[in-house]
Image (cartoon, rainbow, N blue to C red):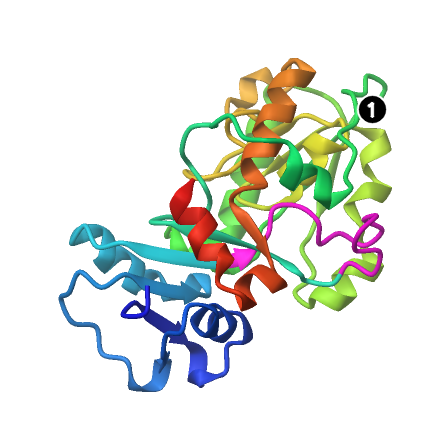
Amino acid sequence: MKDWIFLSKDGNDEYINRLARGVGATVTDSRNFVYEKSQRPIVLRGILKYKIMQLCKQENRDFYFVDTGYFGNTKGSRNNPQGWKVWHRIVKNDIQYNGPVITRPAERWANLGITIKPWQTTGRNVVLCLPDEKPMRFYGLDLEQWTKDTIAQIRKHTDRPIVVRERVKNRNERMVTEPLTDILPDAHCVVTFNSNAATESIINGVPAFVLAPAHAARPIAISDLSRIENPNKPEPDVVRRWAYHLAYQQFHNTELDNGSALRILHAH
């Protein structure tokens, strides 16, 4: 891993730098980076680096995309009550894990201190969690048009109230002004594109619909909005198996620092 390219924005990306240091690698400043054909894997963060990721896919070159973890960064979490950004997903050759669910030990999930709630049955609202514009650009979509089209599709299949939850860009403000858990008790389901709102809603007992081509919640959620009145609610052991697996796809700051993040990902 020492010869991998750790692409750090202006040389100052905290998490890429930590990953590089953890495996004894040198950081590559994004200002000096020129893409050249090679089989050296690229580690990067920031969805707007989609041109590099597309080139890697075209050339069957591995890349590792780093972004916010699926679980454990929510304010009020038992082991992270302030909701600091301490968990990070690392995805090989995509922007969210999109492979099969593999049976994993429960230990990493248990260390998160998160309880998976049973499916709730009393919610009325369809909660539409909008993405921001970055993933829309990644997939070549227009956010405004996607929102209109998605609402229209939902309306074809239900007369439930639709609560539109816009994404606040600033993370600190988002944690204060719009915690998803405040509106989930009244939710029948959550609909989103690629947001972590889907994983958060599932572990809180609210089924989800995910519409992005790649989404870590896809094994539990569905994308067919004609089933809005009959969302997917797998048995508890299926949800647990999925959660245990995703715990092996995200890593704590300390695991970035000591090099175990990439080693665990490679080993599993």
The residue lying toward the viewer, choosing from 157 and 243, is 243
In the rendered image, residue 18, in percent from the top left (x then y), is placed at 52, 72
Q: Main secondary structure of the magenta part?
A: loop
In the rendered image, residue 25, in percent from the top left (x then y), is placed at 37, 74
* As drawn, 54 above or below 4: above
Which residue type carries mark 1? Gly
The residue lying toward the viewer, choosing from 257 and 141, is 257
Q: Quadrant of residue 10?
A: bottom left
Residue sitting at 65 percent across and 65 percent down?
Answer: 169
The residue lying toward the viewer, choosing from 141 and 34, is 34
Residue sitting at 52 percent across and 52 percent down?
Answer: 143
* As drawn, 19 above or below 13: above
User: What residue range appears in magenta?
Assistant: 67-83
Magenta stretch containing residue 77, yes or no?
yes
Res. 232 in view: no
Res. 2 in view: yes
Local secondary structure at mark 1: loop
Pick the quarter of the image with the C terminus: top left
Callout 1 crowding tier (Cα within 10 Å): few <14, some 14–19, many ≥20: some
Describe residue 186's horizontal placement relative to residue 56 as left or right.
right
Describe residue 68's horizontal placement relative to residue 205 as left or right.
left
The residue to which callout 1 is attached is: 123
Q: Quadrant of residue 44?
A: bottom left
Residue sitting at 65 percent across and 25 percent down?
Answer: 240
Describe residue 179's horizontal placement relative to residue 263 as left or right.
right
* As drawn, 167 above or below 100: below
In the rendered image, residue 264, in percent from the top left (x then y), is placed at 47, 48
Residue sitting at 34 percent across and 85 percent down?
Answer: 31
In the rendered image, residue 235, in percent from the top left (x then y), is placed at 66, 13
Magenta stretch containing residue 82, yes or no?
yes
